[in-house]
Image: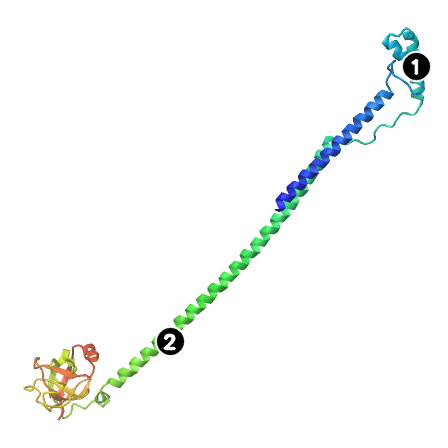
Amino acid sequence: MRESYNTRFFQFFLVLVITIVVSETILLNYKNEAYARESSDSQISTSDSDPEIGQVALESALGSPKALPAQTVAMKAVTLRDQKNTQPSLPRPSHTVSLADVQASANKAQEALKEKKAAEEAAEKERLAKEQEEADRLAAEQAAREEEARLAAEAQQASEEEEATAQEEAAAVEEEPEEAAQEEPSDNGNQFVGTFRLTAYCPCSICCGSNTGITATGTVPVQGRTIAADPSVLPYGTVVYIEGYGTFTVEDTGAFASSTIDIFFDSHSVAYDFGVQYADVYIVG
């Protein structure tokens, strides 16, 4: 819209300048012609001060019988010219507008329009740059907020995981046999039986099959007390000390090697994690 307005203004200015130049040129030509007519040496020009000479000169030019001889007409014309030369002549125009001046004015107007357009473009670029800077600032702030929220969520998750781990560890400590915390007995007075292969079991169907949860001796198994062994090696009711694990009573049996002791646990996962280990076994005397 602004560019269309500038174009129409420039066109109007050019038309106005051209109109002025044409008018000045016509007026100048008219004045020059008038000046030329006043200073002409023509013998047939008429004169307001001497109409008779003009009439005679006209009749002589037209071949009238009353026309004066050409020499007489020429003498009168020279006399009239001398009289006019003694009179002040019309002033010549003191100012003229040339095409170069018009072109210079047009160039100045065009340069002014260019400067105005350049200033508007610079202002527009500055406005766009400020808008882009503001958008970048807002984007950076949004990214910082999102990063802060992400870090807070990760910290919260880590805290929850640590709390859950602490609870699991506390539960595992509570499930440890009470006898394991007891002071290990001295070897004095205890009979060393040998190094046994240690396994673990629980009352589930995976470990005991269709067993109803009662030991071979008719007791209810208790974690931290009940173990299963070969009765021919360790008879039922024998109290043994397993080095590193505590004191247990042989209350159950199973289909395994005579050098194996199966330790009872309430949880199948705990029994599974126990795996297979080896330890020295003593009969408590």
The residue at the far left in this view is: 232
Task: For residue 148, say whether it is visible.
Answer: yes
Which picture quadrant has residue 259? bottom left
Mark 2: secondary structure: helix
Return the disc, 1 or 2, that comes first in the chain's sequence: 1
Which picture quadrant has residue 65? top right
Three-letter code for the amino acid on which mark 2 is drawn? Ser
Locate the C terminus and report the quarter of the image it occupies. Answer: bottom left
The numbered dot on residue 159 is: 2
Direction from residue 149 to residue 183 in the image, left or right: left
Mark 1: secondary structure: helix
Which picture quadrant has residue 265? bottom left
Q: Check disc 2: other Cα within 10 Å, few if <14, some if 14-19, many if 20+.
A: few
Q: Percent x, y for residue 95? A: 81, 32
Residue 139 vertical placement versus 208 (above, below): above
Which residue is under mark 1?
Answer: 53
Give the residue at x 48% y 64%. Answer: 142
Three-letter code for the amino acid on which mark 1 is drawn? Ile
Q: Percent x, y for residue 54? A: 90, 15
